[in-house]
Image (cartoon, rainbow, N blue to C red):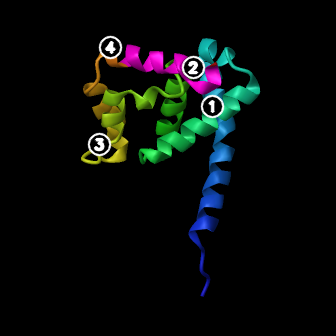
Amino acid sequence: MLIIRQSQLDTFQEEKDRQLIPAIIAFLEKNHAESAARHSSEELNELCAKAIEDSRFYGLTDIHSLMWFSAMAVEIGPQFHEQPAINRGLSDTGQPPAKRIEAMFAGTTEKDWEDARKLKAAAPEDK
């Protein structure tokens, strides 16, 4: 019997995530060109890798959710999901992961998103 340990599965997932980054960057450069252009290729790579990692924390795993999360990290700021109302919506286990983004938008205000933008200013990598 073949036994696959969690550490091996984690390694496979990390590699799969790395392979998604070029597609996500292409999406950002096409659909969020101005914001994406503010970052070097290396920064955009790192930003996307971190966004994928953060989105998986919330159970978001499909490519559309990963692209959305990366776009918000580029447009709003890499810590956008730490804003309390946004975090609450993304963490809502009463919603299936595929519906959390929609539900989160329904439960947030323009002020919540303004507050999320301010988190970007406090981000250590931006100092």
**For the residues marked 2 and 3, what is the alpha-carbon distance in whole angstroms?**
28 Å
Of the image marks 4 and 2, the number of the one nearer the N terminus: 2
Specify the amino acid type for callout 4.
Lys
**What amino acid type should be assigned to the residue bearing mark 3?**
Asp
The CA span between labels 1 and 4 is 24 Å
Callouts 3 and 4 close, C-beta under 8 Å: no
Q: Is residue 120 magenta?
A: yes
Element on which disc 4 rests:
helix
The secondary element bearing badge 3 is classed as loop
Tag on residue 31?
A: 2
Neighbours of disc 2 within 10 Å: few (<14), some (14-19), many (20+): few
Residue 92's label in the rendered image is: 3
**Which one is earlier in the sequence, the residue at label 2 or at label 3?**
2
The magenta region covers 113-126
Which tag is nearer the camera, tag 4 or tag 2?
A: 4
Name the mark on residue 111: 4
Packing grade of label 4 (10 A; few <14, some 14-19, many >=20) is: few
**How many numbered circles are shown?**
4
* Disc 2 residue type (three-letter): Asn
Label 4 close to label 2 by CB (< 8 Å): no
Q: Nearer the viewer, mark 2 or mark 1?
A: 1
- What separation in Å lies between label 3 and label 1 (alpha carbons)? 24 Å
Please give left or right for residue 113 compared with residue 27 in the image. Answer: left
Along the line of sight, the residue nearer the viewer: 46 or 32 = 46
- What secondary structure do most residues of the magenta stretch adopt? helix
- Which quadrant of the rendered structure holds the N terminus? bottom right
Q: Which residue is mark 1?
A: 47
Q: Is residue 97 magenta?
A: no
Residue at 59% x, 64% y: name it: 9
Instruction: Give me the C-alpha separation between circle 3 and circle 4.
Output: 20 Å
Q: Which quarter of the figure is the C terminus placed in?
A: top right
